[in-house]
Amino acid sequence: MPLNLMEHYLVLTDDIDQTRDFYIEVLGLQSGFRPELGFPGYWLYLDQTPVLHIAEWETYTAHSNKLGIPVTTRAEGTGAFDHIAFNGTDPGRMESTLKKENIAYERNDVPHAGLVQFFLNDPNGVKIELNFAV
């Protein structure tokens, strides 16, 4: 059975509102429908797809433990998982937003590929790569 789509990634956090606000205000994702799941959180959408799920560490862990589903342990950064990447359409606007929001980032211009990249971290230390064709 082949895969055909990456659906979402989950960020566990102590502050679901701060994490939600970062992804909405900085990256432009939109908050949308999320069913009752037994723990607080948000689903953030890119177009019609809920690409990012946000959950609160303690309640998510308790809920998952009841179901016998292992939960990632806290660690600096993202462990073996290095980053998540998005494509965008306006690198100048993104760079202006990052500066306005005082978000540290690294810019990588890849002229032979016609690409501008930004690397930054969300409030929980998750590395994000933003790719823009130029």
Image (tube, rainbow, N blue to C red):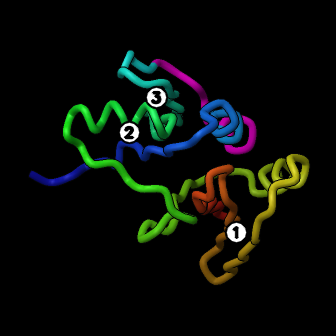
Camera-nearest residue between 90 and 46 = 46
| Spatial CA span between label 3 and label 1 | 26 Å
Label 3 element class: loop
Asked if labels 1 and 3 touch by Cβ distance under 8 angstroms, the answer is no
Quarter placement of the C terminus? bottom right
First in sequence, mark 3 or 1: give its number. Answer: 3
**Any magenta on residue 32?**
yes
- Mark 2: amino acid: Thr
Q: Of 5 and 57, which appears nearest the observer?
A: 57
Q: Any mark on residue 48, and which?
A: 3
Q: Could you tell me residue 120's position as x and y percent?
A: 69, 62
Residue at image x 53%, y 36%? 46
- Would you call the spot at circle 3 few (<14 residues within 10 Å), some (14-19), or many (20 or more)? few
**Where in the figure is residue 70, as x and y percent of width and height?**
27, 48
Compared with 93, 80 (above or below) is below
First to last magenta residue range: 24-33
Amino acid marked by disc 3: Gln
The residue singled out by tag 2 in the image is 61
Q: Which mark is residue 116?
A: 1
Q: Position of residue 18 (x, y in %)?
A: 69, 36
On screen, residue 115 above or below 72:
below
Numbered disc 1: secondary structure = strand
Is residue 83 a member of the stretch shown in magenta? no
**Kind of element beneath mark 2:** helix
